[in-house]
Amino acid sequence: MRVAGGIIRREGTEGLTVRGLAAEAGVTTRAIYSLFSGLPELIGVLCARSTEAMVRHHEAVPVTDDPISEFLPLALAFRSGAQEQADLYERLYAPTIADDRLAVEYPPQVQRTLARVKDTIRRAILAGQLRPLDDQELFQGLWAIVHGLTSLELRGVLGTPEECDRIWRGTITTHVRGLATSN
């Protein structure tokens, strides 16, 4: 699984072949086929594992009576999930444009994770902690920041682990503070 994830990270899913995976893993193609019916099943298992990691990290963040305080832990949970399953991050969390409607669609397997963040945004608006803006617009802005930070960190261009942590915390805190009401 780790070898397949590494190939996907380097070459995308189009670079993953049973023969190439077997060669890199030091096994026979028969060994691969004894575990999976083919590449679609293997990729499906990898995606499910990645999604489970992200959901696990998000669900570890408690829902509180102070929803605005949940944004930083949720962002850091996303970061942890992405780091845990870095090989598949771009495949799973890159949205696509649906047909000619220009509606953004996220892969179905990530909806549960994104729904948790959207719920927190709605609760923070209802609690008067965030300015009453369009919740989808607020989500897209936060998503752009988190996805951007994640992509840069996974590519190794955001700095040392300490710098990354400081950048993550400062960026999310500053963004949420800018959206907050002045209560």
Image: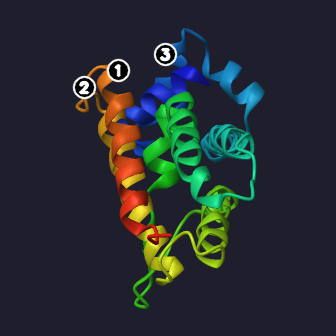
Q: Label 2 vs label 1: CA separation?
A: 8 Å
Q: Which residue is mark 2?
A: 159
Task: Kindly state the secondary structure of the residue where label 1 is placed.
Answer: helix
Nearer to us in this view, 98 or 71? 71
Asked if residue 74 lies left or right of residue 58, the reply is left
Marked residue nearer the N-terminal end (2 or 3): 3
Dot label at residue 129 = none
Q: Label 1 vs label 3: CA separation?
A: 37 Å
Marked residue nearer the N-terminal end (1 or 3): 3
Label 3: how many Cα within 10 Å (few below 14, some 14–19, many 20+): few
Asked if residue 156 lies left or right of residue 2, the reply is left
At 58% from the left edge and 42% from the top edge, which residue is drawn?
Answer: 73
- Rendering quarter of residue 65: bottom right
* Mark 2 touches mark 1? (CB < 8 Å): yes
Asked if residue 136 lies left or right of residue 178, the reply is right
Nearer to us in this view, 147 or 109? 147
Q: Which residue is mark 3?
A: 23
Which one is closest to the eye, mark 1 or mark 3?
A: 1
Name the amino acid, label 3: Ala
Name the amino acid, label 2: Gly
Q: Which residue is mark 1?
A: 162
